[in-house]
Image (cartoon, helix red, strand yellow):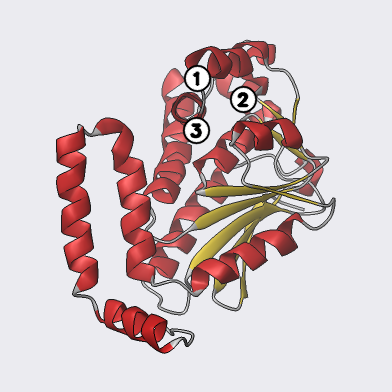
Amino acid sequence: MPAQLQATREGQTLVLTLSNPDQHNAIAPVMYAAGIEALNVAEGSAEVRSVVITGAAGMFCAGGDLLRLQANRQAAPQVQAQSTEDLHSWIETIRTYPKPVIAAVEGTAAGAGFSLALACDMVVAARNAVFVMAYSQLALSPDAGASWSLAQALPRQLATEILMCGDHMAAERLHALGVVNRLAEPGSALTMALALAEKLNARAPNVLASIKELVGDAPHNQLSTHLASERDHFVKNLHHANAGVGLAAFQEKRTPHYT
């Protein structure tokens, strides 16, 4: 079967499933384009409140297709450069997408698969899931934002160790380090991720978009700049119709329904 990114709906959650069974769900260029298109369409749909990215058949993603990488070594450097740019466009789309994106990881997340999980806003992983930055084992440096994501999430020494040594890391260790949000029993990562998505779907979408933007900007902002940004978001959200719904529901002790 050819590599593909399958898109399905579970209520208000868009589920994107990496499917490349012959290559353990290795990431492929057709997935980059499909991922960007799916997110662009879903961004404009009020029916979609969140996104879950997972892998088919109990495996998240084995990383890059090594046969394709070998072939690209025989081509001009621009061929791999364009392929990497296309992957990075998908990663950047996920990072800047205004709705929550959750990774549901079973089996292995290796190389670019690990990078893809890190690009998501939250990670739900099976307890027996394994993560590995396999790049250095193949004499390659990381891509898909791996070095950026790990440097943001962890101390420099630890991020360097993970990238340079390329050791297998258990989901439980990454949970202890704060990289994985929630641990699920094997086989139930998607179920738990969908439950988390449903919880987020009940929140005001404009507020979740503000939170994602603020958290993404925080590492680059001076405190005074960031405080000004928080002020602007707060005022904008206070005057949004959803704030009226939320404040009234809280005072009246009832469940709010946001648009």
Q: Which residue is mark 3?
A: 144
Q: Is residue 39 visible?
A: yes
Q: Secondary structure at mark 3?
A: loop
Q: Which residue is mark 1?
A: 155
**Residue shown at the point (41%, 24%) measured from the top left:** 78
Is mark 1 in CB contact (under 8 Å) with mark 2? no
Indicate the position of residue 244 as horizontal and vertical percent values.
Answer: 27, 82
Q: Is residue 109 left or right of residue 100?
A: right
Task: Tell me how far mark 1 sits from mark 3, CA to CA.
Answer: 20 Å
Is mark 1 in CB contact (under 8 Å) with mark 3? no
Q: Residues within 10 Å of mark 2 (few under 14, many from 20)?
A: few
Say which amino acid is labelled 1: Pro
Indicate the position of residue 13 as horizontal and vertical percent values.
Answer: 56, 70
Label 1 or label 2, whichever lies nearer to me, is 1
Observer-nearest residue: 145 or 218? 218
Observer-nearest residue: 96 or 191? 191
Say which amino acid is labelled 3: Ala
Indicate the position of residue 231 as horizontal and vertical percent values.
Answer: 17, 54
Q: Secondary structure at mark 1?
A: loop
